[in-house]
Amino acid sequence: MDLKEVMEQKNFVIVGNTIDDEKYAHKIKRKMLKNGYNVSAVGKELDSINDVDGDIDVIDLCINPAKGLKLMKECKKDFKTVVIQPGAESPELTEYFKANNIPYMESCLLVGLSEYKK
């Protein structure tokens, strides 16, 4: 899945600090909601991806890589792909995704919003 296809999805989970308006996770959540996406937030609002109600298309990691890896290893929900935001990547995270055949990409949803408006 490329960034254009990601932005065509409907149900997103933003993983990170979505409470503090200085954090990118907060900015991403706010802009995604403003553009009509269904958004759930894990990190400061929900404790686990498993706590998200409903379907998940895209999990957006905007969190410390070690915390993101822990949350992904605990995840039992189905989803289509993971977006790893700049700064949230690590070799351990990408190795886990590759070893478990989890589709992912390193990209930025803010870029996706500016390039592929709904």
Image: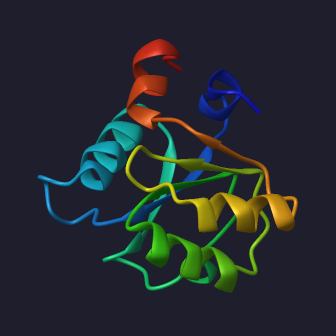
Toward the front, the furthest residue is 91
Q: Residue at x 75, y 61 (%)?
A: 97
Q: Residue at x 25, y 45 (%)?
A: 27
Please tell me which residue lies in front, 31 or 53. Answer: 31
Q: Is residue 76 left or right of residue 100?
A: left
Residue 74: which quarter of the image?
A: bottom right
Residue 52 visible from this viewpoint? no
How many marks are shown on the rendered structure? Answer: 0
- The residue lying at 63 percent from left, 82 percent from top is 50
Image side of residue 34 versus residue 4, left or right: left
- Give 51 or 94, whichever is nearer the viewer: 94
Q: Is residue 50 above or below residue 53?
A: below
Q: Quadrant of the N terminus?
A: top right
Asked if residue 101 lies left or right of residue 96, the reply is right
- Residue at screen point 72% across, 63% down: 95
Quadrant of the image occupied by residue 31: top left
Residue 10, position as x, y percentages in the image: 63, 42
Camera sees residue 116: yes
Residue 65 picture location, percent across and down: 46, 67
Q: With 20 as the anchor, is 65 left or right in this view?
A: right
Can you name the residue that lies furthest to the top here?
115
Residue 100 screen position, x and y as percent: 85, 67
